[in-house]
Image: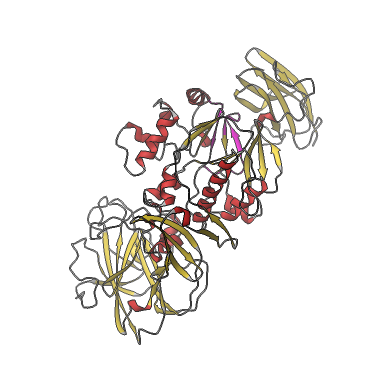
Amino acid sequence: MKKFCNLIIILLAGFCYSQDIILPRGSEWMYLDDGATWNAGWTTFGFNDSGWKTGNAQLGYGDGDENTKVSYGSSSSRKYPATCFRASFNLDSHDSFKYYVVKVLRDDGAVVHINGKEVLRSNMPDGDINHLTWAASTVSGSAEDTFYDYLLTGELMIAGKNTIAVSVHQRKGSSSDISFDLELLGTNEMSFDSDGPYVFYRDNQIVVKSIKESGPCTEIYADKSSAQLMCHVTAIQDSFTVILKEDLPIPEDQYQLPGKILAISDIEGNFKGFKMILQGAEVMDDRYNWTFGTGHLILVGDLFDRGESVTECLWLIYRLESLAEEVGGSVHFILGNHDIMNMIADTRYVHPRYFTNASLLGENYNDLYAVDTELGRWLRSKNTIEKVGDLIFVHGGISPEVASLNLSLTEMNSIVRDCIDTPAVDSNSILLTRSDGLYWYRGLVKKTITESQLDVILNALNSSRIIVGHSVVDEISGLYDGRVIAIDLDHEENTQNGWMHALYIDDGKFYIIDNNGNAKLFLSEDLSGVPSDVSLPQQYRLFPAYPNPFNPETTIMYSVPRRAEVMIEIYNLRGQKIKNLVREFKNTGVHQVVWDGMDNNGLHAGSGVYVYRMCAGDFSISRKITLVK
C-alpha cells in the first residue's frame, strides 16, 4: 500500500483560523463586460488592462445591490456568457502566510486565476473555459449572496505585486443577473473537517481519497479485500468501517411485503437525525450494526445536498445494505431528484464545503460520483420506483402523464438509469422532467389531481397506496383518504429540536414512529373509539360523536363498506346547514373527522344543539350533538 498526503485547495467549513485581510470585499476591480473574445494572457501580471473599466464590488446587474453595474449586451434574452475581472495586491514576502483564503461570491459560476495560474473553479464545468462557456448550474436564493471559501497554499504567491483574475459566468443567455465580489485573507493556522472516503478505480488500482484532521490523504490498494475504509462523522465525532462489495447488482423493483418496514425520505446529509431515527426504530444499534432482522429499510430519495454529512450518510446506507442481506433483511435506496442531480452535474444545492474538498483531493466535484467510483457505480445501480407488497415507493410521485405511458416498473427504472449519463431524447423523457417526472412530481402532495385520476394510477400499478417524499409536510400525512402517504419532513429543524419521525409499517398496519421508539397508529386502521360490535365495516354507520356535549371539539366516526362519495354536514335546529365537514370519496374502512365548533365562515357556531348528517349514495342518517361554550 502506498500512502501520501498533499495540500492543494480546501474549503473552510466549520472551523476557526487567525487571518489578515489582504484584499477586502468591495475592492476596486478592472472589468471587461463587452462579451468579446478574451485576449491571450489576460490572467497574467503583465497584461495591459488600461482599456478596461473600473468599479468597486459588488459588481454585476439585475439584483439592485451592486456598487457597480456591468453591461450584459443589447439583448435581454441573450446575455453575455462571461464577464472578466482583474485586481492586484502586494505582499512584502511570499513567506508571510502559509495559507491564503479566497472568499468568492459568484452568480452563477466563476474561475479564479492568481498570477496566470488557475487556482479554483466554482460551479463550472470541466474542460477549457473561454468567453462562451456557461456555468454548470443556475444559482438562486441565498446562494446568490454566499461567499464560498477556499484555501490556497503559499507557494502560489510571490513577493511584491500579485494579480488575481476572475471570469464570472452565466448559466444561460436568459439569466436575469450576475454578481461578483471577492475577499483574500492570509492565515498560518488551519484545521480540517473529515470527509470521505472516496473510492476510485484507476489504472487497475483502488485509489481511496479522504480528508482527515491532518489534511487530505490518498491510499492505494491492489484489490478490494485489502482496502481499509474508515468513515469518520465529524457532526457527532464518531466513525464506522465499510467493506467494499464484490459486485453491485441492480436490485429487484418488486418485493413481497415484509413483517416490518421503516420508510424515511429527504435526509439531505443530516447524519445526526438519520442515526437518531434508525436507532429509535431499532434498525441499527449504536455501533451501526443491523438489528432489524428481516425487516426492510426504505429510503425514499434525497440523501444529497444541503447538509454537511452526505458522504457519511451514503456510506452508512452502503454498510447497512450488506449487513441486512446477511440476515434476510433489505435496504432500499430509491433515487430522488437531488441524488440524480449530483450525478448529472447539477450542483446548485450542494453544500459549499464539498466543492473545494474535491479540489483538495485533486478532483472536480463531479468526479466524486463518476462511473469510475464506488459510490458512483452504486448509485447508478439504484431504482427510482419500487413496489413492496401493494405499496408503491417513489420520491416525487406518479403523474397522470407518466401513468399514461403504460410502462412497467422495470421499464421506468431502466429508462431513468440509462438517462443519468445519456440524456433522454424521446417521449419517455417525461419520466425525468421537473413537473411530471417520477422524482420531481408534486401533484400528489399538492392534491392537484382528482380521486378518479388517482384511481387510474393505482389500478395501473395494481397498488393500494403510494408513499412519496420530495414535498415537505408538517407531519406524516395520509392524503386522498390515505392512499397517498407524504413522509418528507423538515428533518434538520426537527433534529435541532431533538426529535425525528418516520413511517413504520408493522404487520400491514401503519404507524408514525419517533426516535425514542414510540409508535402511534396512523390512518384509518386506527379503530380506537369505534363501538365493539364493529370490527370490519359491513355497512354504512354513523357513530355517536365523542365527547358529547363538547368544548372545544368533538370527533365524528363513520364506516364505509365500499368506496363511495361521502358527505358529512352540520345543521342547526332550524335546518340551516352551517358547516361542510366531509365531501370526498372514501375507501372501505372506518374514518373520522373532527368538528371544532366553527361554521363555514370561520365563526364560532355558539352554544346549542346541532345535527350532524352523513350521506353516501342512498344511505342517509342524522344524529344530535350539543356544543357548550
Left or right position of 197 against 608: left
Task: Tell me where residue 541 sits by quadrant.
Answer: top right
Left or right position of 492 against 506: left
Judging from the image, the colouring scheme is secondary structure
How far across and how far down the image is residue 500, in percent? 64, 49
Q: Residue at x 80, y 34 (%)?
A: 628
How far across and how far down the image is residue 542, in percent? 73, 21
Q: Residue at x 41, y 25 (%)?
A: 406
The residue lying toward the viewer, choosing from 107 and 41, is 41
Placement of 200 over or under 583, stated as above or below: below
Membership of 480 in magenta stretch: yes
How far across and how far down the image is residue 11, in percent? 44, 66
The quadrant of the picture occupied by the N terminus is: bottom left
Q: Magenta span covers which residues?
A: 463-484
Left or right position of 231 against 68: right
How far across and how far down the image is residue 561, in percent? 66, 17
Report whether residue 351 is seen: yes
The residue lying toward the viewer, choosing from 311 and 12, is 311
